[in-house]
Image: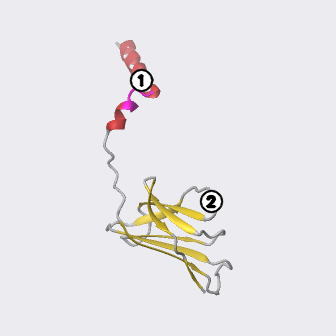
Amino acid sequence: MDAAVDTMVRGALLVAVTGGLLAGCAGLPFTGKSCPEITDTSAWINRMPGPGQPSGGKLHVVVRVDDDQPWMLSPAATHSNDVLVLALSEGGPSVPGTAAYQQSRKPLPQRIEVECRGRTVATIEKITVAY
């Protein structure tokens, strides 16, 4: 009897590894939280002189969302120095209904794209510079 169970287990593992069981998962509904509606975006570079202030300035990005949970912005891969892609995801230390990001490193972007679950949900073309 142990040999029969062993054969069944090995067969099930072979089917799982070759994708037989994974094909059935493709039709399952997505259970994660959907992307919130973006209600406002802003971006500015602080070039005001002061202690600890980087010479090139510090980029600040704030995204307001129609949700009562905290969200966060994280840098995503991009192929251009002029565009900063930020991924919007659940969690983080933000105030509920907002997501924020700061960057001191150069180069500072000319445009910011906010993505959620692989889809662009907002583009910020106007980045204010404060002196």
Asked whether 62 or 18 is in front, the reply is 62
Residue 36: give its label: none
Q: Quadrant of residue 11?
A: top left
- Determine the residue positioned at 34% across, 32% down: 24
Q: Is residue 96 magenta?
A: no
Of badges 2 and 1, the one in the foreground is: 2
SS at mark 2? Answer: loop
Asked whether 102 or 107 is in front, the reply is 107
| Quadrant in the picture for the N terminus | top left
- Determine the residue positioned at 37% across, 18% down: 8
Q: CA distance from mark 2 to mark 1?
A: 42 Å
Residue 15: give its label: 1
Q: Which residues are magenta?
A: 19-23
Residue pointed to by mark 2: 80
How far across and how far down the image is residue 27, in percent? Answer: 32, 37
Q: Earlier in the sequence, mark 2 or mark 1?
A: 1
Image vertical order of residue 130 relative to residue 115, above or below: below
SS at mark 1? Answer: helix
Which amino acid type is marked by label 2?
Ser
